[in-house]
Image (cartoon, helix red, strand yellow):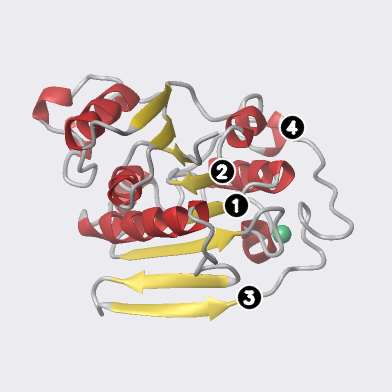
Amino acid sequence: MTPAALILGAGGLGCPAALALAAAGITRLGVVDDDRVEASNLHRQVLFGDADVGELKVVAFARALARRYPGLAVEMHPVRFDAGNALELVAGYGVIVDGTDNFATRFLANDAAVLARRPLVHGAAVGLHGQLLTVPAGGHPCYRCLFEELPPAGVGPSCADAGVLGPVPGVIGALQGVEAARILEGETPAFVGRLVQYDSQAMSFRTVRYNPNPLCAVCGPGARIRALLPANYPAGDCAPL
Ligand SMILES: [Zn+2]
């Protein structure tokens, strides 16, 4: 099967990630999103324009990519990524690009990727800051090795309060796309065991190195997460980093 990337979220991270993957020569992408384009998305969701407002994001996303890259096949999944469909979606692709915007979905994406033994490129952006890291196939280390558990609801600002400077997800999403293309091409991923933090005010990148966590609930030797249970991923807040 043609190597392909699955992009979770056709948003501020997913749009530039898709452009980077297509520019790198990847010819098959999947995209998961059940939202519609809103006018407030346009400053950072660079595949969409005014005429797309109200359209399903996956449809506008595929149409915009088809105009630029006629040889690119985009598989649309206009569904919410949840504990019921995560494993099946993830298992159908060679690498997962996490461009979601809340903690529950991020932990779900990580756990699904580890259980399905698929590499995952995590990215997040809020305000003037962004971050990314790569989970290799099977974990070791994974996102949960570093962040462990979902924070309780109500921690941190809401998405509406926090906002994000448009170019920040552009930088992070493009790096996610390049990293995912490297993985599909058989190269060594750059961000395994490295949390890269981007500060757009200082124009700086900082790397925090981390190791597999032997107590990790999904990739550690005593892992307790063996299946994806909906109760473990309660829909919640927008996620700051
Ligand atoms: Zn782990």
* 17 versus 145 height, above or below: above
Q: Are marks 2 and 1 in contact (CB under 8 Å)?
A: yes
Task: Say which label, 4 or 2, has the lower sequence index.
Answer: 2
Q: Does residue 29 appear left or right of residue 12 in this picture?
A: right
Task: Say which label, 2 or 3, has the lower sequence index.
Answer: 2
- Disc 1 on helix, strand or loop? loop
Within-10-Å neighbours for mark 3: few <14, some 14–19, many 20+: some
Residue type highlighted by circle 3? Tyr
Front of the two marks 4 and 1: 1
Within-10-Å neighbours for mark 4: few <14, some 14–19, many 20+: few
* Distance Cα–Cα, label 4 vs label 3: 27 Å
| Residue 14, position as x, y percentages in the image | 36, 43
Residue under numbered circle 4: 229
Within-10-Å neighbours for mark 2: few <14, some 14–19, many 20+: many
Q: For the point 70% across and 38% down, which residue is it?
A: 232
Specify the quadrant that holds the C terminus: bottom left
Any mark on residue 210, and which? 3
Tell me which image quadrant ligand 1 sits in.
bottom right
- Disc 4 on helix, strand or loop? loop
